Amino acid sequence: MICREVKRVVYFFLDGSLGPNKKQDFDKHLKLCPDCDARTKLHERLRAFLKRRVTNLSSAAPDHLKTRLTRSIRAFRNEWSAR
Ligand SMILES: [Zn+2]
């Protein structure tokens, strides 16, 4: 698998809808390619973050939510820029 292909199928990978052979190729590429590994992890975090945000929106108080969101975004940004 090449980088361009990894970029194309990353969402399928995260959805778990990638076939077993493709998934194996994908995993193999991530072990060899730090760029794709980092990008995939970023997408994974972003997905988890957005999912959490949707959950919070329906339950948390607005001020509380705002603080939490700001903190999460800042942590996310710091982590990513440190690479
Ligand atoms: Zn790559």
Image: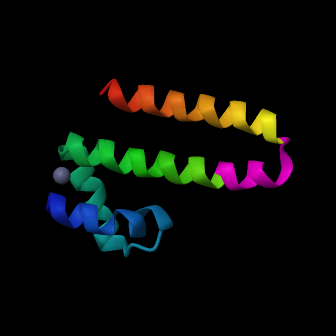
Q: Which quadrant would the N terminus be assigned to in this image?
A: bottom left
Q: Nearer the viewer, residue 48 or 57?
A: 57
Percent of width and height locating residue 19: 37, 76
Percent of width and height locating residue 18: 39, 72
Percent of width and height locating residue 2: 14, 61
Question: Can see residue 30?
Answer: yes
Q: Nearer the viewer, residue 40 or 72?
A: 72
Q: What secondary structure predominates along the stretch shown in magenta?
A: helix
Q: Is residue 41 left or right of residue 60?
A: left
Q: Is residue 19 left or right of residue 71?
A: left
Which residue is pictured at 49% across the width and 49% down the height?
A: 46
Magenta-drawn stretch contains 6: no
Total labels: the figure holds 0
Indicate whether 9 appears above or below 49.
Answer: below
Q: Is residue 22 left or right of residue 12?
A: left
Which residue is pictured at 40% across the width and 45% down the height?
A: 42
Q: Nearer the viewer, residue 7 or 50?
A: 50
Looking at the rendering, the stretch of residues picked out in magenta corresponds to 52-61
Which residue is pictured at 81% across the width and 55% down the height?
A: 58
Magenta-drawn stretch contains 57: yes
Which residue is pictured at 30% across the width and 28% down the height?
A: 83
Snapshot colouring: rainbow
Percent of width and height locating residue 12: 41, 70
Question: Can see residue 25?
Answer: no
